[in-house]
Image (cartoon, rainbow, N blue to C red):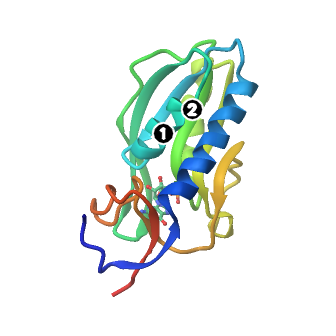
Amino acid sequence: MPETQFLERILFSEEQLATRVHELGRQISADYRGKKPLFVGILRGCVLFYADLIKNISVDCTLDFMCLSSYSGTGSTGQVRTMLDLRESIQGRHVIIVEDIVDTGLTLDYLMNHLKDRGAASIEICCLLDKPANRKVNVTPKYVGFSIENEFVIGYGLDYNELYRNLPYIGVFKKQ
Ligand code: 5GP
């Protein structure tokens, strides 16, 4: 088990996450029947959520990934960069971006601008967590696991300086 002295409290247990991700998978499957969506995971925070989500997708789909970077420690650097781009063309595809958490919205705003001229049939956002209180730009995810307060969270893919992604639950990070 990872060291957890940096944990203030557990916000969502493994069971709560599994239940909600199952619901999201069912909803997306119903919405995308016959559309063969492309799930674009935003590395690295999405990994646990992404894997669990696609296990709950019951329509044909394909998978791809991007890696963007903007965070350092518990604060956004405000500068988003593409570290890894898509392998597949999104021309004519129904794209679902899978993100761990939307905070200021700057990362997804950058991503939507980056993808908008690539000819997708549709692009929607599915995020596990949403922190609407901290939004700086207008980004509206269609599928949201949970809305949370403006607290820094770790676990289930979310890191603090690359640690704690392997926690099976989501917890609030304890400030030093
Ligand atoms: P945004 O650009 O919306 O401010 O931030 C998006 C990215 O910041 C997320 O994909 C995530 O990597 C990181 N981030 C935002 N809030 C948190 C948080 O509470 N905990 C962690 N671990 N990362 C966060």
Disc number for residue 56: 2
Q: Is residue 148 above or below residue 22?
A: below
Q: Is residue 94 above or below residue 65?
A: above
Q: What percent of the width, then of the height, locates residue 13? A: 50, 63
Quarter where residue 102 is shown: bottom right
Image point (62%, 35%), residue name: 25
Crowding around mark 1 (Cα neighbors within 10 Å: few <14, some 14 to 19, many 20+) is: some
- In 3D space, how far apart are the residues under numbered discs 2 and 1 (Cα atoms)? 7 Å
Residue bearing mark 1: 52
Image point (39%, 57%), residue name: 168
Crowding around mark 2 (Cα neighbors within 10 Å: few <14, some 14 to 19, many 20+) is: some
Quarter where residue 76 is shown: bottom left
**With 49 as the anchor, is 36 left or right in this view?**
right
Instruction: Residue lying at the far front in this picture: please name it.
Output: 15
Q: What percent of the width, then of the height, locates residue 3? A: 24, 72
Q: Look at label 1 and name its amino acid.
A: Asp
**With 63 as the anchor, is 132 left or right in this view?**
right
Q: Is residue 120 visible?
A: yes
SS type, badge 1: helix
Q: Are marks 2 and 1 in contact (CB under 8 Å)?
A: yes
